[in-house]
Amino acid sequence: MLVRTTAFGLACLVFAACTDNSLSSDETARRAYLGLDKSISKSLQLGFDGFNAATSANIAPQMTAGDAAGTITVTGQVDQGSSANKGMRLHVGMVGYSDGKIKVNDAGDTVSITYDTSTDTTMQPALTLSLKGIPTGTLTGTLMGLYHLTGDIAGDVTLNLTITGTLQDGGGGKVVRAPGTTTVTGTAVSGGGTYNVMATI
């Protein structure tokens, strides 16, 4: 799960009330992102699962479930060969994905949002990763694309995220992310507002 640096209570301190009608566009964008929080880690894990299992450039679809409902599936291509530097060009697809009620402030208020993406893989959020110095080198990449929202917030959210981290030897020829070393920064734009993402996995 991502660790956010912005305090949950900030929204209620800034705004006179914490009802949906009182929210600024930036706060709406923040909440739209929070429902995707856990999915960032899941997307990366699925990408690495596909990379480690690949026997050709095209990886088999890698799927897992939302904590409450739906699925997230990663597809795409990975580099093959003996080079210590490899790339992944992946797509993130969601169908009815939800991690359930997400806490949005220190008062205990929650939102429940369901996410979907385009069924056309070429239009799905793009997860591009570069692995250098395998198996113990570095990870860089981006996650960019559009997610559709229903539930407590309806509309779209567009992520434009940069990913950096450290690799770890997973044994048996596998490469994994070193826990707690991956940073995620960038923006989530929704409803005319922008949330600046600063997180660590």
Image (spheres, grey):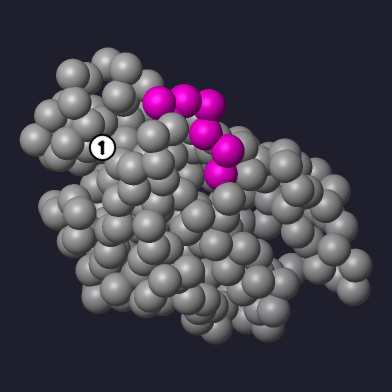
> Residue 85 at x, y = what percent?
73, 52
- Give above or below for 128 relative to 91: above
Residue 95 belongs to the span the image colors magenta: no
> Residue 177 or 123: which is nearer the viewer?
177
Residue reaching furthest to the front? 107
Residue 133 visible within the image: no
> Residue 39 or 12: which is nearer the viewer?
12
> Residue 186 at x, y = what percent?
42, 32
Q: Quadrant of the rendered structure where residue 196 is?
A: top left
> Residue 38 at x, y = what percent?
50, 55
Look at 40% across and 41% down and name the residue there: 108
Horizontal side of 130 relative to 137 (left or right) equals: left
> Residue 95 or 75: which is nearer the viewer?
95
Look at 14% across and 54% down and name the residue there: 154
Label 1 sits on a secondary structure element that is: helix
Q: Residues within 10 Å of mark 1 (few under 14, many from 20)?
A: many
> Residue 53 or 36: which is nearer the viewer?
36
Type of secondary structure dominating the magenta stretch: loop
Residue bearing the label numbered 1: 29
- Give above or below for 19 relative to 86: above
Residue 112 visible within the image: yes
Horizontal side of 140 relative to 137 (left or right) equals: left
> Residue 185 at x, y = what percent?
49, 32
Amino acid type of disc 1?
Ala
Residue reaching furthest to the right? 171
Look at 48% across and 76% down and name the residue there: 65
Look at 31% across and 75% down and name the residue there: 95
Residue 5 belongs to the span the image colors magenta: yes
Q: Where does the C terminus fall, quadrant-wise?
A: top right
The magenta stretch spans which residues?
A: 2-9
- Give above or below for 193 relative to 70: above
Q: How many marks?
A: 1
